[in-house]
Each structure stands twice: as structure tokens, then as C-alpha cells.
Amino acid sequence: AASQIDKALSLRWKYVWQHRTPPYAAPTTAPSLPTDLHLYEIKTVLGQISLYHKDTGVSLTSLPGVQEFTSDFGVLSDIVEEVSVKSLSYTRLKLLEQKYSVHNALNGIMESQGESGEEHSDFYNCYKVDTHVHMQSGMTAKQLLTFFQEKVTHQSQDVVMVAGGVPITLERLLQLLGMTSESCRVERLLAQFDPKTLQRMDKFNAKYNPTLKSELHTILLRFENYMSGRYFAELIKNTFKELEHNTSTFAEHRLCIYGHRRDCWSTLAAWQNTHGVASTHNRWVIRFPRLYTVFYEAGLVKNFAELLSNIFIPLWEVSLDPTKDPILDHFLSHIGGFDCVCDIKAVDPAPFQEDPALWTNAGNPNYITWMYYIWVNMVALNKLREGLGKSTFAFTPQCGLIGPTSHIIMGFLVADRICHGLNIRKNPAIEYLYYLGRIPISMAPTSNNAWHLPYLLNPFPDFFRRGLDVSLSTDEPLVLHHTQEPLIEEYSTASKLWKLSATDICEIARNSVLQSGFSHRTKMQWMGERYFLSSSAGNDPNKSHVPSVRVAFRYETYHDECAYLQR
């Protein structure tokens, strides 16, 4: 069983993206790109976008093809279902949990006393990052309501849309919808959770739509509309101002690129630049919704390869020649990673192992196919950008909320970190591999409670006690949270219901910083100059507010586990 676990980990190291030179290491002088880049051209071959030599056709990057990948995925799937591997994993996970209990019994008082000499060494003053929050629902219901009422009161003559060639003002639109500023309440906006959304993703998603009127959704929560996204930008900037009031709270908000047009990236970057939608407290993550079927049926794309090209070719072009789109080049430097989202209740078709250009039907390629092609093209792009001295991207897909086990296995194979991960609890082998692989998991218990898994059944406290790398996130404050500090609300709820200590909460906050896509320099400022060391030597308790005895326990337990498997 131990040899099979080692084999599974080897497969992960084969696929996961690793920097040629880590950000904390001295830069290498060895060239990583050929000097004759002018002899290469951007092409798509079997779904892989890269630089290919004009004469020889040789690719600049060599990555596993889809058939090799599918074979390795099958090997990993077989490993996690072996009875001996499951039995060993279950035993070791239980032992890890018992070790945590013993550590708490022996060192709990020492941890509660703390090691920091700072006067305000508590959770509220430690750095924390909301590692998974959708920008379209990143504001609270009160923020949205206040913004909307101000617009109705003071800017009701704004032309917000055109219908049949006739300009329509905000005041006129409200008349058509039978609404007034006085009739608007949080309940009327329907932006809060109610029990009807439990296990009903359609009703949950409907709450993104204020008052269930598509017109208001378009003008308030989209950047592509008649107003060029002005209201959405102003709303985001108000949200960022609230975020900046707490000097130790940060976030990674997600924006969408759909891939239905080649200019999707330039449109998003121009909107962000025009309206100044930026904050030092935010790092962008771009998500790719699995909406191929919608765009194919609308005639916007002819095949799956065209959608992939629309997503990645503009990034290759601007990476090689920033003058082609300076605004997009600048925008990319503020992006920390890519996310893949989907209707995770949809039944996946069989894996597709041929050229994506041959996928010319309306069916959506399965999750594995999507994940592979995003991963392979992201890694190829990262290798180019790293060689050019530019920022790179992490792969942070949403997987394991519901759906088959294959989604979680896929995350283990290619993701830098995952979001949700509830289904990890269903297979002890997978959970143990996530522990050994030290794969970060961003979890959102309040969101899960809203429509799928009751709060007290959430596996988060078990994952945490066993030593998995978990953090807390808000996911959708607009429909889930009631205070003006959603992340604090998330931590507060978790600490009370699961009886987490102050040290536990600070450790989770520290995890969120290390998981995030904020820069190396920023993390040094927040966590100390040696934050990247996993031992207590990398912990500065005056910054992290985590006692070094806790960090040492996690480090020693992990290495004891590795030593056990190597016997």
C-alpha cells in the first residue's frame, strides 16, 4: 500500500506546475528560452497552444498528451480504490487526529499564552485572505441595496439601456418594473439565503439576479452592458473600500472569461483600467465557466478548440509582445490564478481523447477534458512567461463540492489548490493523498450549508485536526452573509460552532496567506522573510500570531508520516 501511495504522489509531481526558479530563490542565469524566438509561431496542435518552430514544427514546450494523461488518471483512480490503500489511509488519518488531540492536551495552555510580545496579538490583527469569493456576489446585500438606492435617488436620469432604439433611464426602468426607491428592501432584492435553496442549485444561482429581473442584473452586476459596466465598477470600488477598512483582511475575487470571443480578455482589461477597479487588498483570479454548449448552440464557437484558442492565444500574443495590448499586459500582472467552474450536478459524458477541433457537437466536454486542456495550456503559458520574467498563474479549480470522485482525483493530479473539496471525505485514500501532497483546500462552510451540506456535517474541522492545508472563504457574501465583514463572520461562525481555539483560528488565517496568490514580497511583509519554510524556522509569531510550537508540531508530524511510509 505504501508503494502505491508513493506512486500516486509521483504522478502528482509529474503534472503539477513548479517554478523553474522559486520566487524566494536567487534568480538563475541560465537561459530558459531560445534566443531565436522569431523563428517560432503561435499554433494550436491537438488542443495544446504553444510556440512551434516554423521549419521543424517542434514545440517550445513538451508536455504530456491527452492520451498519456488519461492513462495516468486511470492509474491514479485505480490506486485510490484499492482496499489496502484505503485501509492504510484510514488508519493513518485517525492516528493524525489522535496526535492533534494529544498535542492540544500537552501544549494547549502554552499555545493560549502565546509567544508574541505584541500588545494586540489576536485574530483581528493577523493577516488573512478570503481565498475564494466571486466578484459578482462579493458585496454584501446591504452594500448592494445602499448603492442601488443612491443611484435611484441621485442619478435616476442615467441612461442605463436601450430598447428598440429608445434610451431608457434608470427612473423609467423602475417604472417598467413596478419598483420605487421606497419599495426596495434587502428582502425585495432577494439577495439573502433562504431554506428553499437547499440542494437546489438553480434557485441558489437565481439569487445572483437582484429582484429576479434580468435588466437590473445586467446594469448592476455585469461589465458588458450599455453603460460599459460603470455601475458594476462603482459597486466593486465601494466593496474594496469596505475591505480596506480592515488593514489585515484581503481577498482574491474572481472574474469570468467565457471564451466565446477572441476579444474577451481585452474587453475585461479595458473595463478594469477605464474604471480603476483595483485595490492593494485584492488579487484577481479568472474563472472559466464550462459553458461550451451555450456558446456552440448560439453559433459563437464552432468547436471546443476554438473556445480554448479564444481563452489562451490572446495571452500568448500579449506575453510575447506587450505593445500589442499594454492594458491587458498590465492587467495580467494583477492576476494570481485561473479557476474552472461548472454545473457540477450535470452528468459528464465519456472522456474525449482526440483533437478538440473534432468536438463539433453541442454536448459539453467532460470535467476531465476541460481540466486537462486548461492545465496543459496554462503550464505552457507559465513556462513562456517565467522565461520572459513575467508573472505566472496558479490553477485553483472548484472541485469536490458534489459530483463524482473523479473530480477530486483530477484536482489532486493538476491543481495548485482547490476550492470546496467536500467529497475528499468520502475516500480516505484521497484524503490521505491530499495531506501528503500538501494541497491547499479553500473551504466555504456557510456556502455549503446554504444548499448542500449542513454546517455541522462539514468535514472542515476533521481536515484541520488531521493537518490538511485548509483555509476559510466566503464564496458569495451577497447571498450568504449578514455583516459588513463577511470573512470575519465566516471565521467567527466556525470558531463558535466547532470550538476552535484562538491558535486554531490564527493557524487557518496563516494558511490562507500562504495559499493565496499574493506576491512573494507581500507575503514576506505579512509573514516574515522566511515564511516559505514549513518548519518553525519559517514562522514569525509576531506576524502570524501562531505559536511556533504549533508550527513545529505540524512540521514534525508530517515528516514522521513520510518517514513511516518509507520504512
Image (spheres, rainbow, N blue to C red):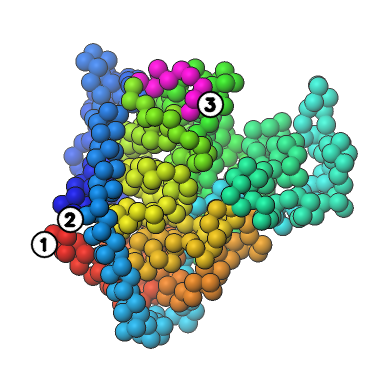
- Residue 346 place in picture, x, y as percent: 51, 37
What whole-number distance in Å separates the C-alpha atoms at marks 2 and 1?
9 Å
Q: Which of 337 and 291 is in front in this view?
A: 291
Q: Distance between the residues labelled 2 and 3?
A: 42 Å
Depth check, front residue: 368 or 535 = 368
**Left or right of 408 on screen, residue 89:** left
Residue 358: where, in percent of width, then height? Answer: 40, 17
Residue bearing the label numbered 3? 293
* Most distant residue in the left direction: 567
- Going by the numbered disc 1, the residue's amino acid type is Arg
Residue drawn at (31%, 79%), measured in percent from left and top? 102
Magenta range is 355-364
Farthest residue, direction front: 83
Q: Mark 1 points at which residue?
A: 567
Q: Under tag 1, what secondary structure?
A: loop
Is any atom of residue 398 visible in this view?
Answer: no
10 Å neighbourhood of mark 3: few (<14), some, or many (≥20)?
A: some
Whether residue 166 is visible, yes or no, is yes
Q: Earlier in the sequence, mark 3 or mark 1?
A: 3
Q: Which residue is drawn at 38% across and 86% down?
A: 109
Identify the residue under disc 2: 2
Q: In the image, 142: left or right of 29?
A: right
Residue found at x 43% / y 20%: 359
Q: Is residue 84 left or right of residue 220?
A: left
Tell me whether circle 2 and circle 3 mark residues in contact (CB < 8 Å): no
Q: How crowded is mark 1: few (under 14 residues within 10 Å), some or many (20 or more)?
A: few
Identity, as a three-letter code, of the amino acid under mark 3: Thr
What secondary structure is the magenta-colored segment mainly?
A: loop
- Where residue 216 sits: x, y (%)? 75, 40
Q: Is residue 404 magenta?
A: no
